[in-house]
Amino acid sequence: MKFPAFDTIPSEEWDALVMASPDGWLYQTHAYIADAAAQGNRNLSFALMTDTNEMLGICPIYLTLDTRYSRNPIFRFFQRAIMFFLRRMKIQGPWDYRILSSGFSGPALSPRLGAKGRRKAFKDIGARLVALGHQERVDEIQLRFTEMAEANTGEGRPGLSLLWAMGLTEPLAMIPRSAVILDLSQPLEKLRSGLDEDCRSEINRAMKEGCGCAVDPDSRVERYYHIHEISWNRTMGHAHPLSHFTDMESLLGEHMHIFLARHAEADVAGVLIHSFKDAVIYWGGCSLLEGQKVKANNYLLFEAVKWAKEQGHKWFCVGVFDAYPGMNLKEYRVGQYKAQFSSRHLEALEGRRIMSSRAQHYDSRMRTRLIKHRKAQSRLDERE
């Protein structure tokens, strides 16, 4: 078995396998991987080939640095100051963890492989990832399977045992995450009845308030960005630059769609989705305070679900989320928003392998902190 590098495979051959593969989706395409590498990630993606040069699969993989600062604000201040000078000198810092990550995607295999062949191919890819991890002296290997791919959306969705067979025995998050995937073959009324009661109530409220929806309107990126900038500066402390979205539009073209909620003749909320093959994923959203007052967020995302169904798509992935409160309450709240859209939550197909003693030590400390945090939160909940 051979593992030729990404740059040695013609883009037409790479994309042909992604299109044909039941595991293939947008984030595994040649252009998407090349763009991810251009953003500063070191591209170590590879293909899986037989000795007779038959391509059996591909695996996007990137080498990234994850800087993990202390939670103590005084220590963190000095760490950031030191890292500022090390970055200027282009030197890896002591708090930089080397991560081998598949990003938002994972391996894709040839449709010609049967069940036994697929399992062997995944094991070969897992062994290659471990070898790359040792070669690059990484602290962790992180792998995700593409939630929207055909093989992972229907009844044939694999369990976590496949990741364990590949040697990725730890969950990607300390508390395993969940995924919400809507089956768009169901009648619209059944999709609506599957919503959380509060979610349905907010959608009805937005409609009574007179909210409307515009799909891919003129100047869509600029109009979406206006809402994004105000919303993210308010909630996250920083917004992406406009170029983040214009570059995404240039890269994805017809696979990117923007929905804007209109109220009183003004844009008050936005939703951005990606579509490919027969599936759609919710990429992100934002809203002004005016949009929150009229409950535009849930209304707009459900309008995106309805649009995807009308376009003939089979699946809508609302996203992967933290199912339980952890250290990052912001991520948990976003997860609670996603969880409203279905009572059926699946295990996220993601796993990791810890490769260094310092990563193991960091993981143990974080687990201890998480347990203390959960106990403290439980005591607060009891008092309330």
Image (tube, rainbow, N blue to C red):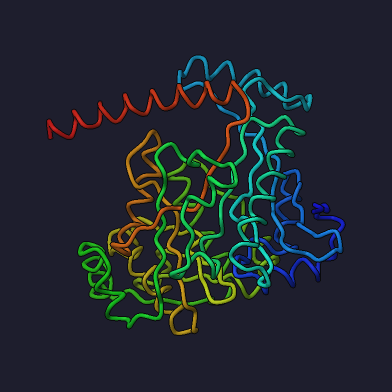
Measured from the top left, where is residue 8 in percent x and y?
A: 87, 57
Measured from the top left, where is residue 257 in percent x and y?
A: 55, 71
| Depth order, front residue of 59/256 | 59
Q: From what the image shows, is residue 228 above or below residue 177?
A: below
Q: Residue at x 36, y 39 (%)?
A: 329
The quarter of the displayed image where residue 116 is located: bottom right
Quadrant of image for the N terminus: bottom right
Measured from the top left, where is residue 141 in percent x and y?
A: 62, 39
| Depth order, front residue of 55/115 | 115
Q: From what the image shows, is residue 70 above or below residue 299?
A: above
19 vs 48, left or right, is left
144 vs 128, left or right, is left
Query: How many numbered circles are shown?
Result: 0
Measured from the top left, where is residue 27 in percent x and y?
A: 64, 61
Residue most toward the left?
Answer: 383
Q: From what the image shows, is residue 272 above or below residue 103?
A: below
85 vs 337, left or right, is right
The quarter of the displayed image where residue 328 is located: top left
Q: Residue at x 35, y 71 (%)?
A: 263
26 vs 266, left or right, is right
Quadrant of image for the C terminus: top left
| Depth order, front residue of 62/46 | 46
Residue most toward the front?
Answer: 116
Q: From what the image shows, is residue 129 above or below residue 360?
A: below
